[in-house]
């Protein structure tokens, strides 16, 4: 039984070490929303809302998620006991459309709380089978190919197991060609277009087939499953979907239509761990590999991603770079580190396995609200 007596929201700004540019926008400072859920004994579970400051990746933003949690998510949870954290998803789906990032932040905090109350790692509770996660890096769009080559070569030297290049019209074929030439044929390379193309301008994507990419992530718009299926027929390179997949139903449609062959699962995008598990299980039965994406999370969201990525069908490297890739200093102790391209799953510590540096969080907090019944 899980009973939550209080939900607290905090917003903080954390400067990225370097700006991150994707086809639809640029971020140099992350506006982070942290969620805590509190049990009557004072124990806390931590979650992080992955929504951004602007609606360029998803229609949800930090500014929409906050009132959604206050008005609709928290009231369904507070003082209304759950048999387990896994049951919250269904409760949040009933006559409550969308707002998946808002729902996920609270749902994931409940999983962390439940695991902490049981003294068990979140990885084990979710059904994890790995003690370390192969790590990939996601490199933002650079002003020229030489700058991207430099970053990609450095990433390979640091031990990353896969290098993902953000692309868009005009920053695609030449950039990828230059990187492939520099890193050689053995390095696992992929690209992510963040929905920047349409079926009218696929020529660059067809040309990318030459470079032995592990996948092309989200070339077309999020709702375009049918068009992705058409595009997949034109490409040898597997399409991976990110923005398009918000639930297990989407993954089923993708498989049925042939819209792609790989799924990027971000628990914060799909409504939380319950939904992520359902997508994982479906993909496993359908023979589609999955990997864990990232949303430039602080150490809190990262802990959730690491735990989820320990499940069996997460068979490709995840966007779970170590804390130092993003921040001068993270808000958790210990920070997330990578050794030989691997991040260790903290199986011997409860919940997400890291402690939030609450003093530092308080110093960085620019907005806070507690919701109780
Ligand atoms: O599409 O995967 C994406 C960051 C912000 C928005 C969308 C995406 C990303 C990333 C970052 O690729 C990956 C990471 O957290 O390292
Ligand atoms: Mg993506």
Image: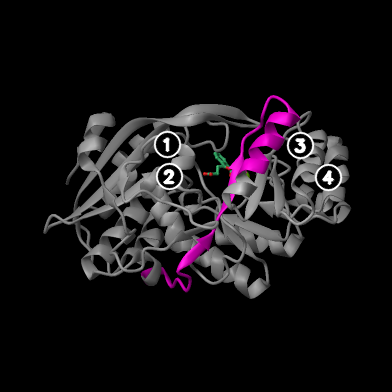
Magenta extent = 125-154
* Residue 151 x %, y %: 64, 37
Residue at mark 2 to residue at mark 4: CA–CA distance: 31 Å
Q: Earlier in the sequence, mark 4 or mark 1?
A: 4
Q: Report the residue at 46% width, 34% height from top.
A: 61
* Residue 323 x %, y %: 43, 44
Element class at badge 1: loop
Q: Are marks 2 and 3 in contact (CB under 8 Å)?
A: no
Q: Which residue bears the numbered disc 2?
A: 323
Element class at badge 3: loop
Q: Earlier in the sequence, mark 2 or mark 3?
A: 3
Given residues 229 and 146, the one toward you in this image is 146
Q: Which residue bears the numbered disc 3?
A: 197
Q: Which residue bears the numbered disc 4?
A: 208
Give the left or right position of residue 75, taking residue 33 as reference. left
Q: Which residue bears the numbered disc 1?
A: 327
Q: Are marks 1 and 2 in contact (CB under 8 Å)?
A: yes
* Residue 9 x %, y %: 27, 39
Residue at mark 4 to residue at mark 3: CA–CA distance: 13 Å
Residue at mark 4 to residue at mark 1: CA–CA distance: 32 Å
Q: Residues within 10 Å of mark 4 (few under 14, many from 20)?
A: many
Residue 56 painted magenta: no
């Amino acid at each position: 039984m899980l009973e939550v007596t209080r939900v607290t929201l905090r917003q903080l700004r954390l400067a990225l070490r370097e700006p991150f540019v994707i086809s639809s926008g640029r971020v140099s400072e992350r506006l982070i929303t942290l969620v805590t859920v509190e049990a009557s004994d004072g124990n806390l579970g931590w979650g992080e809302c992955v929504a951004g400051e602007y609606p360029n990746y998803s229609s949800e933003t930090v500014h929409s998620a906050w009132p959604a949690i206050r008005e609709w998510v928290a009231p369904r949870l507070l003082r209304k006991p759950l048999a387990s954290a896994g049951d919250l998803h269904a409760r949040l789906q009933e006559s409550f459309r969308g707002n998946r990032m808002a729902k996920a932040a609270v749902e994931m905090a409940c999983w962390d709380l439940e695991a902490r109350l049981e003294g068990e790692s979140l990885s084990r509770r979710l059904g994890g089978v790995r003690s370390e996660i192969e790590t990939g890096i996601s490199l933002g769009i650079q002003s020229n190919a030489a700058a991207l080559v430099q970053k990609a070569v450095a990433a390979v030297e640091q031990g990353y197991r896969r290098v993902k290049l953000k692309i868009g019209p005009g920053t695609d074929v030449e950039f990828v060609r230059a990187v492939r030439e520099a890193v050689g044929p053995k390095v696992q390379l992929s690209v992510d277009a963040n929905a920047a193309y349409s079926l009218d301008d696929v020529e660059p994507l067809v040309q990318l087939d030459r470079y032995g990419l592990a996948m092309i992530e989200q070339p077309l718009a999020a709702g375009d499953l049918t068009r992705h299926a058409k595009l997949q027929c034109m490409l040898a390179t597997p399409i991976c979907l990110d923005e398009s997949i918000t639930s297990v139903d989407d993954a089923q449609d993708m498989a049925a239509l042939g819209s792609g062959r790989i799924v990027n699962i971000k628990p914060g995008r799909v409504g939380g761990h319950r939904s992520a598990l359902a997508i994982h299980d479906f993909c496993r039965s359908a023979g589609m590999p999955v990997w864990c994406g990232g949303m430039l999370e602080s150490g809190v969201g990262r802990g959730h991603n690491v735990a989820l990525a320990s499940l069996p069908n997460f068979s490709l490297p995840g966007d779970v770079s170590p804390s130092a890739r993003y921040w001068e200093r993270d808000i958790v102790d210990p920070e997330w580190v990578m050794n030989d391209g691997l991040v260790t799953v903290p199986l011997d510590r409860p919940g997400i396995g890291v402690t939030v540096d609450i003093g530092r969080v308080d110093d960085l907090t620019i907005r806070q609200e507690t919701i109780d019944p």
